[in-house]
Image (spheres, grey):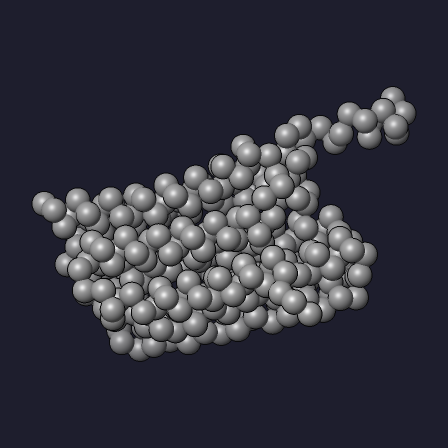
Amino acid sequence: MSPDRLDIAWLTLIGLALATLLVPSLVSRPLFANALLLTFAALKGRRIVLDFLDLRAAPALWRGLVSAWVVIVVLFAWLASAIIALI
Amino acid sequence: MSATDCEQQGTGWGILEDLPGDPMIWVLIFSELAAFGLFLGAFVIARALHPAVFASGQATLDAHLAGINTIVLVTSGWAAARATAAARAGERGRARGWLFGAMALGGVFIAVKLTEYAGEIGLGNGLETSPFFTLYFLLTGFHLLHVGLGIVILAVVSRGARAESVETGTAFWHMVDLLWIVMFPIIYLVHP
């Protein structure tokens, strides 16, 4: 049986979860590491929203609202860490 | 008004009817996302105000155990999505099997998280140790309650395994998954 959309989403999520765990030991610059960690979180969130929650076929309003929640939370976390690092 | 008229006019949920599952679960999902979003925002602000306290607290956490739990929860989410696909295809037995798989992995998540808590409490860390641990235990504890509630919801919808009820239960489960995906790096890995 060949992998379908759900299998590919799951494998992508596993890959991103493993990559997330490697970031602290591979990337030493905090701002860059934080950006990478939070980008991976946003990408994982996107897969869950589109493929698992199945909002791919839902109206753009709902897909956009849930996706925006993910982006706003991770962007806020990164901006706060960046501001503290720059002060 | 005849039954046909009611069907033509929908169930009165308006644009929420375009979402998978019962619209009521989406009212709950949007409320939960707002609450957790504010909670995570408070965590981020508190960390910006007390970077040293949060750095020392974060250093005592077991990020690898939490990482294992990420893999457990996304795999559970995959099983739940498979259950929805099976229920939509009218394969109720298969849907039930996938739901049991998702619930079992939810149980593993709880067991791993409780092991993690035991280790942290063993190190002398509790709700009142520092602002970091107050927010850490509240955020992850609140999320853990949702995992437990999600397992109960999946158990309820697995009885009939009808397509709409499975969609409803798994939508809640995917929200729990989504919350963890965002919480995990912010709490365990992001440098203060």
Residue A2 falls in image quadrant? bottom right
The one nearer the camera, A69 or B53, is: A69
Residue B87 falls in image quadrant? bottom right
**Residue farthest toward the left in the current orientation of the protein:** A87
- Residue B17: x and y in percent read 68, 35
Relative side of B84 to B146, left or right? right
Write the residue at 66% across / 61% down.
B82
The one nearer the camera, B131 or A61, is: A61
Write the residue at 39% across / 55% down.
A41
Whether residue A29 is visible here, answered yes or no, is yes
- Residue A67: x and y in percent read 47, 42
Tell how many labels: 0
**Residue farthest toward the top in the current orientation of the protein:** B1
Write the residue at 27% across / 48% down.
A78
**Residue farthest toward the front in the current orientation of the protein:** A2
- Residue B15: x and y in percent read 64, 30
- Residue B138: x and y in percent read 37, 56
Whether residue B127 is visible here, answered yes or no, is no
The one nearer the camera, B17 or B42, is: B17
B11 shown above or below B159 = above
Relative side of B100 to B46, left or right? right
Relative side of B104 to B178, left or right? right
Relative side of B35 to B43, left or right? right
The one nearer the camera, A35 or B171, is: A35
Write the residue at 47% across / 66% down.
A14
> In which quadrant is the N terminus of chain B drawn?
top right
